[in-house]
Image (tube, rainbow, N blue to C red):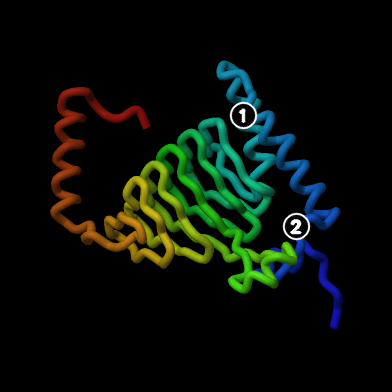
Amino acid sequence: MTKRSMRQRMLAGDLYLAYDPELRKLQARCKRLLWQINNGHPDQYEKTRQAIFELFGTADEDTYVEPPFYCDYGLNIHVGRDFYANTNCVILDVAKVTIGDNVMFGPAVHIYTATHPVDPKVRSTFVESGKPVVIEDEVWIGGMAVINPGVTIGRGSIIGSGAVVTKDIPEMVIAAGNPCHVIRNIDETDKAYWEEQLADYIAEMGPLPW
């Protein structure tokens, strides 16, 4: 059997040791970039934006992350168009985190891909593993929600503030609670109401600037 690196094992979702020298170098790189992001002057956000582009595995020109922001590696975070994360977001990206287009995070959203053995004796050896998280297009996650390892959140859904998401959430629903569960579907009634609200705004204020 070919011996894989700890990084390869980590990304495959197999047990690995985070104290591996290669992973420690990647963690140090991440910390340097996070320092730039979290300590940048507010009037010089372009420098912060460049640090975000360098930190993430994939980012869009409209990616916007309010500092402070925290993650493990950054390289395993892939975001689509028009991603916005409010302040105090945490993403533990030992596995891949895929975030689609037009996704919004409220304050203090936490995403965890890292997990540990259930058996305490194995856990005490400090081996760990990860499970990827997928957040599809047009999802809104409310403040202080926690997304646990291996979860997929379907397109267009809303996760309520303070939710603890332990299982997949289907598309076009509102879900909340601990554990997070579906409250109702997002349907044509919602579409009609919010299109009416938008039309009222445009009638008074004029077209949107984009």
Q: How far apart, in angstroms, are the residues tagged by discs 1 and 2?
A: 24 Å
How far across and how far down the image is residue 55, in percent? Answer: 67, 42
Query: What residue does disc 1 label?
Result: 38
Front-most of 97 and 155?
97
How far across and how far down the image is residue 117, in percent? Answer: 63, 70
Residue 172 circle label: none
Query: What's the amino acid at mark 1?
Result: Asn
Whether residue 87 is situated above or below residue 124 in the rendered picture: above
**Within-10-Å neighbours for mark 1: few <14, some 14–19, many 20+:** some
Whether residue 152 is situated above or below residue 143 in the rendered picture: below
Residue at 21% in and 23% down: 205
Q: Nearer the viewer, mark 1 or mark 2?
A: 2
Disc 1 secondary structure class: helix
Residue at 31% in and 55% down: 177
- The single residue placed furthest to the front in the displayed view is 121
Whether residue 157 is situated above or below residue 44 in the rendered picture: below
| Left/right of residue 47 with respect to residue 159 in the rendered view | right
Query: What residue does disc 2 label?
Result: 18
| Left/right of residue 152 with respect to residue 112 in the rendered view | left
| Left/right of residue 30 with respect to residue 93 in the rendered view | right
**Within-10-Å neighbours for mark 2: few <14, some 14–19, many 20+:** some
| Left/right of residue 120 with respect to residue 64 in the rendered view | right
